[in-house]
Amino acid sequence: MSLPRLQVIVGSTRPGRAGGPVAEWFAGYARDHGGFEVEVVDLAELDLPMYDEPNHPATGNYVNEHTRRWSALASRAQAYVMVTPEYNNGYPAVLKNAIDYLNREWRYKPVGFVSYGGVSAGTRAVGQLRQVLTTVKMFPIPDAVHIPFVGQSIRDGRFEAGEAAVGGAKAMLDELLLIVDRLIPLQLPAAGGENR
Ligand SMILES: Cc1cc2nc3c(=O)[nH]c(=O)nc-3n(C[C@H](O)[C@H](O)[C@H](O)COP(=O)(O)O)c2cc1C
């Protein structure tokens, strides 16, 4: 039986970003966890323009090729982990843009977070993400990885995870797997009512 697919979405695109090493560490840890087929989705590579669809995404009526490509890519995951820094008390605009493009693709799927920043460890960014993602009917889970002063844990381009990060990653992956195992057999509809 094939494993459920987990997409690790890299939510920052800044040259020299910490998001690269952090996502690389988490994706490696998730592969070793063994519960998922892990796929990294790098928003820098996806390179979406600022939202430019004429129709509400809940219609699934996409006119742009980049949206259809993003829709097909996101659709094939059963769970997600968003790797996000904190920018000005929130999460990066590029991540909001990528979320807003889609709607039905996200529905009824669990999502966890790996956040990082300064003293707040990206927790304020995650608070905002949880609020937004429930609007597209995702299930944000409480278990998460929060990394304070991320720059201090990156050496030679590699993120060196401490005990708290490893513990958080294990709890989050276990929980995502539990939810995926219980939700998929329910065969929830891909499309519910409109949500504005
Ligand atoms: C525009 C901007 C705003 C930032 N605002 C915050 C903030 O509000 N809280 C925080 O803890 N760190 C903040 N930082 C520091 C970032 O969390 C840190 O630089 C992190 O490495 C950024 O992620 P990235 O390297 O993946 O782009 C900010 C950084 C940038 C570039």
Image: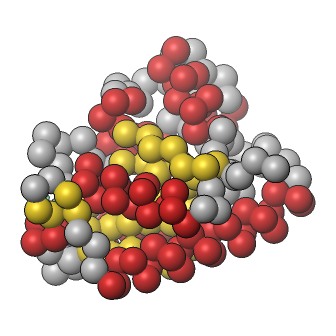
Is residue 104 visible in the rendered image? The answer is yes
Q: Tell me: residue 178, above or below residue 196.
A: below
Q: Quadrant of residue 45?
A: top left
Q: Is residue 113 left or right of residue 59?
A: left
Q: Tell me: residue 171, above or below residue 20.
A: below
Q: Is residue 74 left or right of residue 164?
A: right
For the rendered model, the colour scheme is secondary structure
Q: Who's the residue at 15% across and 63% down the image?
A: 154
Coordinates of residue 156 in the picture (x, y in percent) = 10, 56
Coordinates of residue 166 in the picture (x, y in percent) = 39, 77
Q: Quadrant of residue 126?
A: bottom left
Residue most toward the right?
186
Q: Who's the residue at 34% across and 53% down the image?
A: 24
Q: Is residue 74 left or right of residue 167?
A: right
Q: Tell me: residue 105, above or below residue 196.
A: above
Q: How many marks?
A: 0
Coordinates of residue 29 in the picture (x, y in percent) = 44, 63
**Which is more toward the observer, 118 or 194?**
118
Coordinates of residue 47 in the picture (x, y in percent) = 34, 28
Is residue 84 visible in the rendered image? The answer is no
Question: Image quadrant of ligand 1?
Answer: bottom left
Q: Who's the residue at 34% across and 59% down the image?
A: 25
Q: Who's the residue at 71% across and 57% down the image?
A: 108
**Which is more toward the observer, 84 or 62?**
84
